[in-house]
Amino acid sequence: MTYTIEGETGPWELVIGLEVHAQVTSNAKLFSGAATEFGAEPNSQVSFVDAGFPGMLPVINRECVAQAVRTGLGLNAQVNPWSRFDRKNYFYADLPQGYQISQFAHPIVGTGVISVELSDGSTKEIGITRLHLEQDAGKSIHDQHATKSFIDLNRSGVALMEIVSEPDMRSPEEAGAYLTKLRQILRYLGTCDGNMEEGSLRADVNVSVRKAGEGFRTRCEVKNVNSIRFVMQAVEAEARRQIEVWESGGTVDQETRLFDTSRGVTRSMRSKEDAHDYRYFPDPDLPPLVVDPAWIEELRAGLPELPDARRTRYVNEFGLSAYDASVLVAEKETAAFYEEVATGRDPKVAANWVMGDFFAMLNRLGKGIEDSPVSARHLGALLDLIADKTLSGKMAKEVLEAMGETGEAPGTIVEQRGLRQVTDTGAIEAAVDAIIAANPEKVEQYRAKPTLFGWFVGQVMKAMKGQGNPALVNEVLKARLDR
């Protein structure tokens, strides 16, 4: 079903494109050897190149180029063996060179495609227009002094990949799904950590609205949105604003806007510049970037298994449902954890435990999988204790809870707490006989009301402190009560 927003003149369709700035995972900047570590003291990671000192020459970082190529390959995009860096001229206080080195006319990566999954189970392909490399600007800090702004140049020169989509999205959900999938692919590739809180991934959201069957109307760009939820909210807010403008007889001006997250509205920032405003020209200090096709193939051969391929494998080889497979591959750390647990074991049982009790434990503890007190090896060992009937399912849940509190191996906890399941038929028969002998009236009631069987099971398990093998308890009880 097509998503529309109802205005006074009827339904309006949304047209959305995203320009995503992804910080390249690299220990050094794009054109200098300065460090890129997040959270360092202001202006402690700045070379003469980053600070725009006269006469300083940029030198391309080979690893940043490799990361851009890997990303292009992961996006099923065309990698261009020949690309070029241009100077994009504009003035900001935190742009010491007075220009940004970027790729404008000749990007390193051309057209590609991302397939996204939507809540109704359908999939949609979103086109990628281009991916180009560029350097980041510094950061202006406005909250440290009453009348002055401070400048931190640690980010100046950090390598960015700007990934531009086609205007193929038609709803806030599609925009959110696209950004989620793009972030997932980047994290699997290891080319960007995807940390939106730290600014490693941020999006410029282009929005316009139109009536059904129309061509594109004027778009506005909402700058630097730093969460998937805010991207979706910004799309909705800007679309509704534009609809009000059009329906009141006005026209939407092409401009750059900001999203006010506290009020849920967009605010005008500046009129939108065109390419000629930036006076692009080839950077005279950098020759064209020529990438050997053999090197591209070498990088392709070293790519990890990406989420779509992994999800398909989980469904086809492990027999998981499409939903379960999608949950497990959502984060590469979760997929790696699950695969370690599932190796040599029933993959469906492993999936149930990882997604069920293990996730619930992490949620209770307020921890992520990367700092889980229970390792994949220990969770796997717990499943082995269930498989060999040392533990019942209920006992295993108790042991997992103890593992979360102590970080100890399940075998250690079982021995310390005497939690081993009783599979001795004689001991179970004795417990069953004792319960039956002590409750003759219940036995009579059972004859007329077989649903009382559950009561007997509960009494036997209670008498055995929960350590009786449930299947054996049921078997023995059934035989005794029905004779």
Image (cartoon, grey):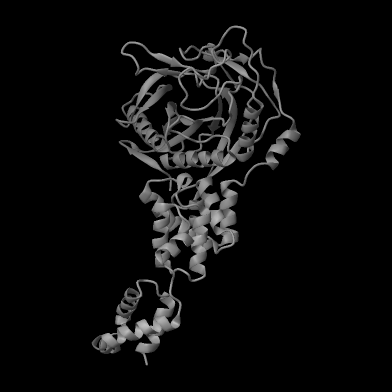
Which sits in the foreground, 84 or 301? 301
Residue 410 in view here:
yes
Q: Position of residue 211 (x, y in %)?
A: 41, 36
Q: How many marks?
A: 0
Q: Position of residue 61 (x, y in %)?
A: 64, 24
**Quadrant location of the C terminus in the rendered image:** bottom left
Q: Is residue 437 above or below residue 350?
A: below
Residue drawn where x is 43% and y is 37% of the image = 228
Q: Which residue lies furthest to the top in this view?
A: 54
Q: In this view, does 405 lie above or below 167?
A: below
Residue 211 in view here:
no
Which sits in the foreground, 458 or 465? 465
Residue drawn where x is 50% and y is 52% of the image = 375
Q: Is residue 70 above or below residue 35?
A: below
Q: Position of residue 350 (x, y in %)?
A: 51, 60
Which sits in the foreground, 144 or 278? 144
Q: Residue furthest front?
A: 416
